[in-house]
Amino acid sequence: MSPSPDAIEAVSQRLDNFVAVQRSESQGFGPEAALFVEAAADVLRGGKRLRGRFLIAGWRAVEDAAGARTPMTQAVVGAAAALEIFHAAALVHDDVIDNSDTRRGRPAAHRALEAAHRAAHWTGDAEAFGRSGAILLGDLLVAWSDDLLEDALTGGEASIASAARAQYAIMRREVTIGQFLDIAEESAFLTEPDERHAERALRVASLKSARYSIEQPLAIGAALAGADAAQLDALRAFGHPLGMAFQLRDDVLGVFGDESVTGKPSGDDLREGKRTVLIAYTREALPLPARRIVDELVGDPLLDAEQIASLQRTIVETGALERVEALIADYAREAERSLSGARLDNAAVGELRDLARAATVRTT
């Protein structure tokens, strides 16, 4: 059977089918294993499937460049679904690192496992169980991602499969390094000159999000279509600045987002101590005493609503929010310009531009 023509539906169907197989294969392992597999299935529900959609769009931009409109293949849909599983793994680990309580309006995976421990009246520390279980859950999802990618590439042309694996491997390495740099920056920022904070924050944004969320999914999709160097370069030139704009929008939402829309408490990034460009620009504009107050507040997990509101006002009044909005617009324009004259399918380029707007002008 050929995949559904709708990218989100096709990827979601592939994920559902894959999870059904995992449930079946783990049936004999007992109720605790069933709990674990269901926890993995739960974190795969919902979401915008943005990375999978960019992978499919990258494939189509190259595949259809000759003028044909090729239906999505099982290999492309499977690779997109594998990428969504890897993303779920990253979110599970990210929530443990950040000690986040919620994800997409529901309890984060470690909190859900903690609640399951309590509901079962098991012995021991429920919070520790939740954290440990979530670490292993992320590892299971990484393994699932590998399994699904290999299944997608089975039977395909060897050179194309090798190129896709290489791009996937780059993505995995870079996002892991980016995640470490993100947590390192929360500890290391005071050892660096203030004028370098924005530069360092942009480095984290590039590795942790821009390349991982958009540039590499495009590159994986292009590799599956047998892209040449010029086509791959054009998609990368589009993907990286768009990914930067995407992450900067995420930073803004992490401070000013509406909890009822984002599914996470407003100001959560401030409680978690995220040293984003928004915070770097804020500090640059403040005199030393006020800068010290910001440093004392950012990263305090007990910040109340009044303190969050005060920090939000400071960010706005220093012009930091306006500077970040201008930077988002600059990156979006850079991405838009990069597609002009590229040897890619025109309809797919239009789809990429639509995805670009969805990624940068958003509330979730």
Image (cartoon, rainbow, N blue to C red):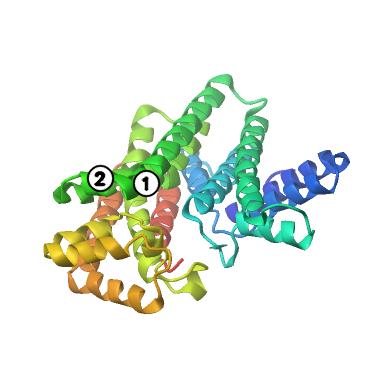
Count numbered badges in the picture: 2
Q: Are marks 2 and 1 in contact (CB under 8 Å)?
A: no
In the current view of this chain or complex, which residue is farthest to the top?
158
Where does label 1 land, which residue? Answer: 182
> Considering the numbered disc 2 on the image, is that residue within a helix, a strand or a loop?
helix
Please, which residue is most extreme toward the front here?
124
Q: In what element is the residue under mark 1?
A: helix
**How many neighbours does mark 1 have within 10 angstroms: few (below 14), some (14-19), or many (20 or more)?**
many
Tell me where residue 247 sits by quadrant.
Answer: bottom left
- Up-down relation of residue 99 to residue 134 (above or below): below
> Looking at the image, which residue is at 39% across and 66% down?
253
- Relative to the observer, which residue lies in front, 310 or 85? 310
Residue 64 shows up from this direction: no
Name which of mark 2 and mark 1 comes first in the sequence: 1
Q: What residue sits 15% from the left and 46% below the top?
A: 193
For the residue marked with disc 2, what is the amino acid? Arg
Q: Is residue 127 left or right of residue 328?
A: right
User: Does residue 60 lie above or below 155 as drawn?
Assistant: below
Q: Residue furthest left?
A: 287
Q: Which mark is residue 108?
A: none
Task: Name the side, left or right, on which 105 lies relative to 351.
Answer: right
- Left or right: residue 357 versus residue 189 is right
**Residue sitting at x 32%, y 47%:** 187
Residue 258 relative to residue 5: left or right: left
Residue under label 2:
200
Give the crowd class for mark 2: few <14, some 14-19, many >=20 residues within 10 Å: many
Amino acid type at circle 1 is Asp
Vertically, is 357 above or below 143? below
